[in-house]
Image (tube, rainbow, N blue to C red):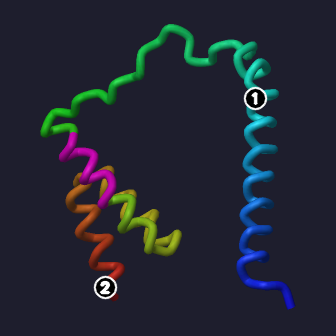
């Protein structure tokens, strides 16, 4: 049975060799990466548009509507869609929640 210190030393040497091989691979790969065209160009990072309180509220309502619609059967979804067209999104959400509670 090998001594624990010798086994540990051998494993450390294997790790050191592996790291050296990885470093060599990266150094051979660097010129290829440098030769690739710049995909971002000179564009700066795109900012997210600022939302007004009204837009944010509309997005929250849309998300709530879509979330409630997800739990409905196709026939129930068509009923809720009709309600949305005639009476608005808040009424459609309430109707959908009632259908889910059944």
N-term-proximal mark, 2 vs 1: 1
Residue under label 2, please give it: 101
Q: Residue furthest bottom?
A: 1
What are the residue bounds of the magenta stretch? 56-64
Where does residue 37 sit, x and y in percent of width and height? Answer: 70, 13
Q: Of helix, strand and loop, which one carries label 2?
A: helix
Against 96, residue 19 (above or below) is: above
Between residues 76 and 11, which one lies in front from this camera angle? 11
- In the displayed structure, does residue 82 sit left or right of residue 70? left
Between residues 35 and 83, which one lies in front from this camera angle? 35
Image mark for residue 5: none
Q: Of helix, strand and loop, which one carries label 1?
A: helix
Against 67, residue 89 (above or below) is: above
Rendering quarter of residue 36: top right
Image point (33%, 59%), residue name: 65
Crowding at mark 2 (Cα within 10 Å: few <14, some 14-19, many 20+): few
Quarter holding the C terminus is bottom left
Quarter holding the N terminus is bottom right
Q: Measure how far apart labels 2 and 1 are at the Cα level.
A: 62 Å
Image point (75%, 13%), residue name: 35
Crowding at mark 1 (Cα within 10 Å: few <14, some 14-19, many 20+): few
Residue under label 1, please give it: 27
Rendering quarter of residue 84: bottom left
- In the displayed structure, does residue 50 sit left or right of residue 25? left
Instruction: Let me know if residue 14 is in the magenta part.
Output: no
Where does residue 88 sit, x and y in percent of width and height? Answer: 24, 52
Rendering quarter of residue 68: bottom left
Image point (27%, 64%), residue name: 93
Where does residue 94 sit, x and y in percent of width and height? Answer: 23, 69
Between residues 61 and 99, which one lies in front from this camera angle? 61
């Amino acid at each position: 049975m090998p001594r624990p210190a010798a086994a540990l030393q051998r494993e450390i040497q294997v790790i050191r060799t592996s790291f050296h091989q990885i470093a060599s691979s990266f150094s051979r790969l660097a010129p290829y990466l440098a030769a690739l065209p710049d995909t971002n160009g000179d564009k700066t990072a795109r900012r997210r548009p600022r939302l007004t309180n009204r837009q944010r509220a509309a997005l929250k309502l849309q998300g709530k509507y879509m979330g409630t619609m997800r739990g409905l059967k196709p026939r129930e979804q068509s009923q809720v869609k009709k309600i949305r067209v005639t009476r608005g999104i808040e009424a459609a959400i309430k109707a959908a929640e009632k259908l889910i509670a059944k």
